Amino acid sequence: MKVLCWILILFSLFSNNAYAIAPINSGIIKQAQEYGVSHVNDSLITFLQPWISYEERATKLNETSERAYLYTTFLLLATDAREKKANGKVVSISDSEQIITDYSGTLSFSVTLFGKDSSFSRNTTAVLRQGKSKIKAYQITAPNEAEKCDWLNSKLYTAQCYFYFDEREIDISKPVVLSVLAHDKQERKFYFDLGNIK
């Protein structure tokens, strides 16, 4: 619930009249709601699987693999429906239409990063690369201090970052690479084939 609320709050600050990835109609709204409701008992990682990209240099995928999620309008609608179903609330078309109205036109990425010290996420920047184009994020939310991974034996820190891009600057039928540069000077790259993501 915290993840959706955080994304929706930040998304609401930066909306326009375009649609994230593809136009949304009543059929797509129903599909998104059905996806959310039917996956209510899945783990969050399983639920988000179609919208994930792992850092391109990841040698193995585990709980410390850096990853990015593309929050499309479809995923926002599905997440809302999933959380309402889990909390025994009614999933309504009007709520979904409000999400579309409030949060459209932005490509939003949620990125989980790991580093060796608590300051590694300071001054994080992000760009989308598409062909020869380089599009800067117009809004970045990243912690100055990363959290210690207490659940690991090794000394590792994690940061949850959010990056927002104006969809009008991007050809949504073509792939992009999300490039994230943190204070530790390590560039992380995440590939998304936008034409094949709902």
Image (tube, rainbow, N blue to C red):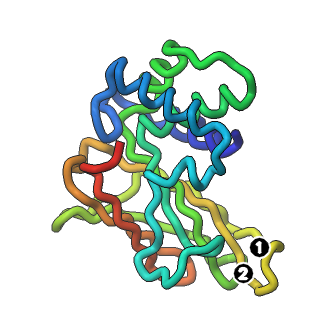
Name the residue tied to disc 1.
149
SS at badge 2: loop
Q: Residue at x 59, y 55 (%)?
A: 45
Inter-mark Cα distance, 1 to 2: 6 Å
SS at badge 1: loop
Q: Is residue 32 left or right of residue 41?
A: left
- Give residue 158's quadrant in the image: bottom right
Q: Residue at x 66, y 26 (%)?
A: 84
Q: Residues within 10 Å of mark 2 (few under 14, many from 20)?
A: some
Relative height, residue 79 to residue 157 (above, below): above
- Which amino acid does the dot numbered 1 rest on? Cys
Residues at circles 1 and 2 in contact by the CB criterion of under 8 Å:
yes
- Give residue 190's quadrant in the image: bottom left
Residue in front for this viewpoint, 58 or 39: 39
Name the residue tied to disc 2.
156
- Which amino acid does the dot numbered 2 rest on? Leu
Q: Please state, as top left, top right, bottom left or bottom right, where the N terminus lies in the image.
A: top right
Relative height, residue 30 to residue 75 (above, below): above
Q: Position of residue 192 (x, y in %)?
A: 34, 60
Residue in front for this viewpoint, 54 or 35: 35
Residue 5's tag is none
